[in-house]
Image: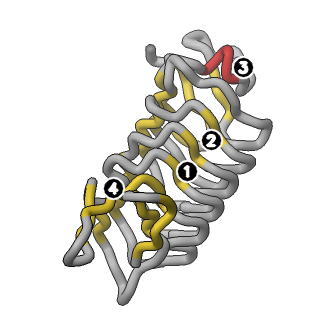
Amino acid sequence: MYTVTSAGRVALTGYEGSPTFLAVPGFVYDGKMRFAVTSIGDKAFYGCSTLTYADLGDARVVGLKAFANCSSLEELHLTAYKVKGWAFFECSSLREADLSSVMYFGEKAFRGCQLESVAFSGNLAYMPDGTFAAEFLGASGESLGASPKILAGHSFEGTGGRLRLVS
């Protein structure tokens, strides 16, 4: 389901059935007009327990609680620059996320995810405390904290909520 957000643009705002695979198209057509899919709406897939894969295409913004409590979501691909609060909260099966395009994270956006691999944008500008439950460690195992200045442009891997710098 889509909602027009501005001239020529729509947000993906919901789903029907029990999807397991999501590939957001760059454009949708209503029979007369072509609309660019530029965002994922608030709570669009909230609690969708069947979703295992999500490619958010060219969507630039992921809404508040858009995928929160999607307990089966394992793989995520996005090019968004902004991920709003609680967007992927408690996606407990999510292990890998390439967040190299994200500049702004909302509160607790990835809290409750069991990430084992994550990459951050070199342009990371805002990430409040508690965005991730993981502890970020330097190559020698020292705690780095979780500020944008420290994490920007780096990749981390690990398990058990402890992610070590790899690049």
> Mark 1, residues whose alpha carbon is within 10 Å: few (<14), some, or many (≥20)?
many
Badge 2 element: loop
The label number, if any, that marks residue 36 in the structure image: 4
| CA–CA distance in space, label 2 to label 3 | 12 Å
Question: Based on the displayed image, in which of its 4 quarters is residue 53 positioned?
Answer: bottom left
Going from N to C along the chain, the mark reached first, 3 or 4, is 4
> Mark 2, residues whose alpha carbon is within 10 Å: few (<14), some, or many (≥20)?
some
Residue found 52% across the figure and 45% down from its top: 115
Q: Nearer the viewer, mark 4 or mark 1?
A: 4
Q: Nearer the viewer, mark 3 or mark 4?
A: 4
Instruction: Reply above or below: 108 against 126.
Output: below
Residue found 55% across the figure and 24% down from its top: 164
Going from N to C along the chain, the mark reached first, 2 or 1, is 1
The label number, if any, that marks residue 53 in the structure image: none
Inspect the image, locate mark 2, and give the three-letter code of the amino acid beneath it. Gly
| CA–CA distance in space, label 4 to label 2 | 37 Å
Badge 4 element: strand
- The residue at which mark 1 appears reads as 114
Residue found 47% across the figure and 56% down from its top: 39
Q: Position of residue 67 (x, y in %)?
A: 53, 65
| CA–CA distance in space, label 3 to label 4 | 42 Å
